[in-house]
Amino acid sequence: MNVLRALLIGGCLACACADVTFAQAQPKTKPLGVCADPMNMPFSNREQEGFENKIADLVAKTLGTTTRYVWWGQRQGFIRNTMNATLEEGRCEVVVAVPKEYDLVRTTKPYFRSTYVFVYPKDKGPQIRSLDDPVLKKLKIGVHLLGNDYENPPPVHELSKRGVVGNLVGFNTFYSAENPPSAIIDAVGSGKVDVAIVWGPAAGYFVKRQRVPLLMVPVPSAPGDLPFAFDISMGVKPGNTALLSTLEKVIDTKRVEIERILNDYNVPLVERKAPPKP
Amino acid sequence: MQNKNAASTRYSSVNEINTGNVKNLRVAWSFSTGVLRGHEGGPLVVGNTMYVHTPFPNLVYALDLTKEGAPIKWKYSPKQDANVIPIACCDTVNRGLAYADGKIFMNQLDTTTVALDAATGKELWKVKQGDYKNGQTVTSAPMVIKDKVISGISGGEFGVRGFVTANDANTGKQVWRMYSTGPEAEVGFPGSVETWQGEEWKRGGGTTWGWYSYDPDLNLFYYGTGNPGSWNPDQRPGDNKFSMTIFARNPDTGKAAWAYQKTPHDAWDYDGINENVLVDLNMKGQMRKTLVNFDRNGFSYVLDRQTGELLLAEPFVAVNWAKSIDLKTGRPVEDPAKRTSSKANTKDICPSAMGGKNQQPVSYSPRTGYFYVPTNNLCMDYEGVQVKYQAGQPYVGAIVVSKPGPGGNRGEFIAWDPTTGKKVWGIKEELSAWGGALSTGGDVVFYGTMEGWLKAVDAKSGSVLWKFKTPSGIIGNPMTYVGPDGKQYVAVLSGVGGWSGIGVAADMSLEDPTAGLGAIGAFKDLANFSNQGGVLTVFSLP
């Protein structure tokens, strides 16, 4: 609340020295409570090596504080056991990267947009540009398995509409030492699958770490398809408008730094749609 | 065993507490389990000792009933990787212990089956049934049949291929394992592979997280399998056998005598794991060895338990996804307008994915001939697709919105005549009746509510004779026993599930922004009634 009031009163006249403004507005504040997955590179991990960790650091630094993590696997129960935990000391305040439409939290304005991508070897890859490419019926296609009740990544959903079912190779998102998040990209690198269809931010980091050069090609939505590109926001607990507006200020003032972090992690960025005119 | 006997009737002939004196029932003692999450199942009493289990971390307490206040004889605290919670996540419940031949058996969340010395709590053996890192967990109670411990597996939503395992009760060594889907050699019954496209049966679901029952004369045990594999219905054309199936298996070999699929090609998550109660009934003038099942899909089935022949199938709650069940073919006569699709919005389907009844077991009283059934009165909308987020990725999901069914009450505790397939009486519950039922020789039926009331009801008339508000919502099953002092006691675990309360519906992914919101939509007021916390409350007459 203090932050909000300070911002409202002070406006953002001194945006050039935003760090100072924020730091003064919130002196000796509590650490920023971040909800994150302990084992989901390149998003986050317990060693704080993911891009969500780096963005959280940037936000905390801008606010003149540090981070405090509540770790939980980012799947069913994630928000319940972090942001909405029973015990106050087990709760956190911000999820760094969620789709704008993620309705368990209140989302900020988006700060980047990415897309599902085809990943295949640069040199002798199948050169796929669309889900309608007939070659997809013959190839081994690596995809993520997410959950039950229609819960497939959107491109996989659309593949099934096109009758591409039997030649999919599923990769589990129950990550562990034996099943690391890199597995699906490693499978392209080693030729175990011919192509993978992966959410861009999950792909880019591992694509860079393959011995074989790999291409990332955005998956375009045909008319009638689901969208494959998504705006990504930060999320707070519904009702926490003070933190929401603080984070939006950070997003506005630290746009360049955030984009640098995303580039470091080879996140494929796509142009954001212009906001609808009022 | 958890459901009183191998037939799973949950009927006790003890009759000190009866319809006349139950109004005097009062708390004899109580015991905190020290665990917050949802408490399903119930305690076991063997001799002068009560054995109490908890959700993860799956503690076991042995309480000495010969001493005042039932002090702790021993406590077992297994070491389990805490990572199993976020990985298995949506459900850390455990449905209880089994006892045989001086040993206590438990299935832990991380899929360990453990045998403990009932006298000391010492570990005798333990085996892993699966790997939680592959999405496999276990929440069900084991069942001991002769010299074998029978265990199931959970985790169907992540492509876990369901199986049931027999381990040697003395050594833990695996005797056999049979799958729900796949080739005959692995299923112990023909006809699965051809009902799937390609190799989809390999992630075919059909998990086995419910209750088990056994008929020693026929030497067959019975259980249900859950919803089919992880892909949407469009991606798994075919009946998807043997998901959603009642299996009758020989415990010595694991081979199936018959298999009956209740919901072919499921599109509603009518996870068919509910218990099968073995009773002999007079069906149209002829005594039959039957199996009675109250399925999630809203139908109550009566089958010949020797042959699998379907004798009767009637809806026990509001049902509209199917008009009836064809007794000749055993197949539902579906209303095509209520079959969900990933491409359309399907409104007002009854029952909801939480089922006409969930895991809470029914009771059968041979004195009245009625089944006592805790039911859900919930319907749902399957609305289109939207973006969700898991493991850092946006994905597609149906929005499942659960809502109160006709009348607005979300549950009803009913008495049911299995020979006619008709309701005898019902007690409407504001929330779902999510705890199990117990019937007794005193013609008193006990059940718990999500608000935390333990209620005692007249078995014949359905009049509520007594009730007591326990510290938390009840999703466990009341049980009764005769103590060392010769008195009859009634015991129940209270302890409602996760923050949304309907963590209760644990299997139904509460937090999941589709299914989750549905559940939360239906039960968002639960927090007004109940808070977390596991407590055992034991009652007796003064």
Image (spheres, coloured by chain):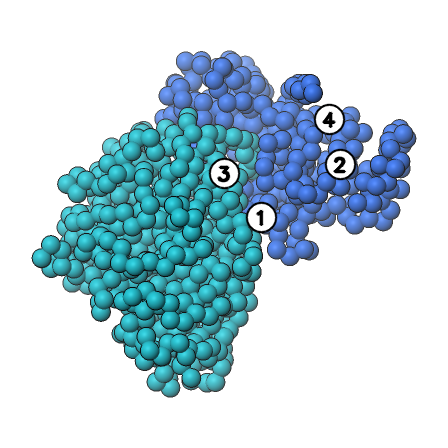
Chain colours: A blue, B cyan
Which residue is drawn at the image coordinates 40% and 60% (left, top)?
A: B435
Which residue is drawn at the image coordinates 24% and 36% (left, top)?
A: B333
Q: Is disc 1 in contact with disc 3, using a CB cutoff of under 8 Å?
A: no
Classify residue B374 as left or right of residue A115: left
Which is closer to the viewer, label 3 or label 4? 3
* Residue hosting label 2: A245
Q: Is disc 3 in contact with disc 4, using a CB cutoff of under 8 Å?
A: no
State how far apart marks 3 and 4 are (Cα). Answer: 31 Å
Q: Which mark is residue A80?
A: 1
Disc 4: host chain: A
To the question of a shared chain for discs 1 and 4, the answer is: yes
- The image shows residue B491, relative to residue B109, as above or below, that is below
Number of labelled discs? 4
Element carrying mark 4:
helix
- The image shows residue B175, relative to residue B343, as above or below, that is below
Q: Badge 3: how crowded within 10 Å, few (<14), some, or many (20+)? A: many
Amino acid at circle 4: Glu
Whole-percent x and y of residue B19?
A: 32, 75
Amino acid at circle 3: Thr
Amino acid at circle 2: Ser
Q: Which mark is residue B282?
A: none
Whole-percent x and y of residue A262?
A: 69, 28
Res B327 seen here: yes
Element carrying mark 1:
helix
Q: Badge 1: how crowded within 10 Å, few (<14), some, or many (20+)? A: many
Classify residue B498 as left or right of residue B130: right
Quadrant assignment for the N terminus of chain B: bottom left
To the question of a shared chain for discs 4 and 2, the answer is: yes
Whole-percent x and y of residue A72?
A: 60, 47
* Residue hosting label 4: A259
State how far apart marks 3 and 2 are (Cα). Answer: 27 Å
Instruction: Point out the tag, 1 or 4, that comes first from the N-terminus.
Output: 1
